[in-house]
Amino acid sequence: MFEWGHSQQIICFRSPGNSRVTRIRFNHQGNKVTFCCHESGATVLSMVQRRQLLLTGGRKGWVTILELPHRHQRQSFLAHDSPVKALAVDPTEDCFISGSAEGNIKVFLSARGDDSMRYS
């Protein structure tokens, strides 16, 4: 378990290894939010700070965009044919990049609020 303001994890409920994330819960100033968006578990997370969006990548190649202030799933789309292994947001937050287990990299426009692919 991690806590805001701590650079290290504060407790580990299970040993590291072949575990998966199936639910995410945030507790910021007493507000709790739960998202269930990947049936096989999320493999990677990335935060879009200014827009307060959370990007998640799943084992089946899906990317989900979650709106934290409104506490709902903005959209979900199939980005890859294999598990998403990496997500990164550019410093201007105009686009984000996803990488798959097969080695494919795709760049998506995040400013438009859709899954428009810019480069593949």
Image (spheres, grey):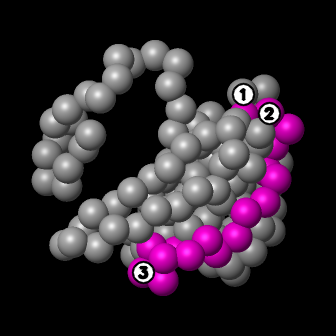
Looking at the picture, which amino acid does disc 3 mark?
Pro
Would you name the residue on which mark 3 appears? 69
Q: Is residue 47 left or right of residue 13?
A: right
Q: Nearer the viewer, mark 2 or mark 3?
A: 3
Secondary-structure class at tag 2: loop
Seen as rendered, the residue at the extreme right is 81
> Magenta span covers which residues?
67-83
* Nearer to us in this view, 97 or 11: 11
Q: In the rendering, at what x and y percent does residue 90 appear?
A: 52, 59
Secondary-structure class at tag 3: loop
Q: In the rendering, at what x and y percent does residue 119 appear?
A: 80, 54
Cα separation, mark 2 vs mark 3, equals 30 Å
Going from N to C along the chain, the mark reached first, 2 or 3, is: 3
**Rendered-image quadrant of the N terminus:** top left
Cα separation, mark 1 vs mark 3, equals 31 Å
Would you name the residue on which mark 2 appears? 82
Cα separation, mark 2 vs mark 1, equals 6 Å
Residue at (85% x, 38% y) in the render? 81
Q: Residues within 10 Å of mark 3 (few under 14, many from 20)?
A: few
* Disc on res. 101: 1
